[in-house]
Amino acid sequence: MNYERTFRIEPGGKVKLDRFDPGYHGKLAGRKQAADEIDSDCDKMRELQYLLYAENRHSLLIVLQAPDTGGKDGTINHVLNSMSPQGTYAHAFKVPTPEEAAHDFLWRAHKVAPARGEVAIFNRSYYEDVLVTRVHNLVPKDVWSKRYDLINAFEKGLLENDCTILKFYLHISFAEQLKRFKQRLDDPTKQWKISEADYKERDYWDDYVKAYEAIFKKTSTKHAPWFVIPSNHKWFRDMAVARIVVDTLESLKMKVPKPKIDLAAIRRKYHGEEMKARRS
Ligand code: AMP
Ligand code: MG
C-alpha cells in the first residue's frame, strides 16, 4: 500500500474530515504484524538522516498537528526518535510568550526552522495560529484569514532553501480522545498531562474540525502536503508516518559525499611505507 498517495491531501481539494476513518488499519490485524515493518523503516530513517546530515544540502521539516491525545508525543518518542539527536531536534509550540506574541506569528517558527543538514520536528506549529486562534477568536477574522497565504509563502521560502516539508494530522475520533483521557487519568506517569481545560476543549471539537478542513484546503500544496493519518490505532499511525518519512527521504536521492582529500596519498603518507620509514 502506498501510504504517501493514500493519505496525502490533494492541493485545493475540499476535505471533509468525517470521510476519513480514524480507525482504519488496512489489512493488518495489529501491532505484532506491523512491528517488523516499523522497525525496518526506523532503521532506514536513521540511515537516511545520517545521509542528510552528511550531505548538508537538504533539510526536513516535519509538522505534527492533532487534537489532545492524538499522538504527537508518541510519534516523536516511538518513531522519529530513531533519527540521531546529532542533526535532529523537536520543538513544542506552546501558548506564545509575551516576546513571541509581540512579533508576527511566524517569527518563532522561523527561528527554529531547520538549517541545511537538519531535521526539525514541530510538535504543534504555526498552524495553531489558524486553529486555536480561530476557534477561540483570539484575533479578529480579518487577521487570521490572511494567515493561510502567509503560511504558504513562508513554506515556499523554506522550500527555496531546499527544505522538504511534511505535515501530518493525526486523526483520532471524539470517542477515542475520551478513552485516552481516561487512560491518562488512571496512569500515574501521565496524570501530569491532563487539565480540566482539555475536557472543556471537547465542546469545540466541531469548530476544530472546520478549522482543520480550511487548513487542508488552503495549505496542502504539492511541495508541502498535508497527510491525514488514521490514528485511533497507535501502531498504524507509527507505521504510516515512518513509511512516509522514509519514502520522502529516499526520493531526495542523497549520497554519501565524496571525500575532499586524496585518499591514496593519505594512505601512503600516514599508513604506508613513508610512515614506516619515518618511524624507524
Ligand atoms: P500541549 O501541546 O498540550 O503542551 O499544549 C500547548 C498549548 O498551547 C495548547 O493548548 C495549544 O493550543 C496552545 N498554543 C500553541 N500555540 C498557540 C498559539 N499560537 N496561540 C494560542 N495558543 C497556542
Ligand atoms: Mg495538552
Image (cartoon, rainbow, N blue to C red):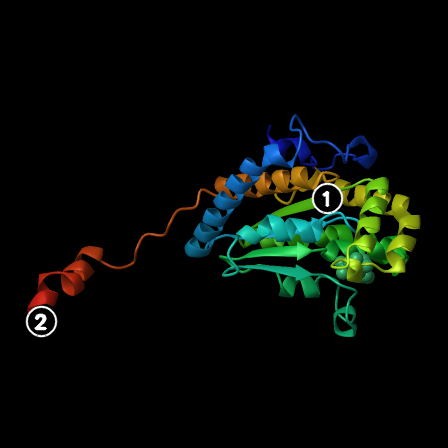
Q: Which residue is mark 2?
A: 278
Q: Amino acid at mark 1?
A: Leu
The x, y position of residue 261, in whole percent, is 26, 59
Res. 152 visible in picture: no
Residue shown at the point (51%, 40%) measured from the top left: 40
Quadrant into which the C terminus falls: bottom left
Res. 75 visible in picture: yes
Figure label count: 2
Return the residue found at the far bottom.
99
Q: Which residue is mark 1?
A: 170
Q: Say which of 174 and 104 sits in front.
A: 174
Quadrant into which the N terminus falls: top right
Residue shown at the point (54%, 51%) measured from the top left: 82
Does residue 237 appear left or right of residue 212 in this picture? left
Judged from the image, the secondary structure of the residue bearing numbered disc 2 is: helix
Label 2 crowding class (10 Å Cα cut-off): few <14, some 14-19, many 20+? few
Residue shown at the point (86%, 40%) measured from the top left: 175
Q: Amino acid at mark 2?
A: Arg
Give the distance between the C-alpha atoms of the residues marked 2 and 1, in whole angstroms.
63 Å
The x, y position of residue 17, in whole percent, is 81, 36
The x, y position of residue 45, in whole percent, is 51, 46
Is 196 located above or below residue 31 in the figure?
Answer: below
The x, y position of residue 237, in whole percent, is 67, 40
Label 1 crowding class (10 Å Cα cut-off): few <14, some 14-19, many 20+? many
Q: Say which of 120 and 33 sits in front.
A: 33
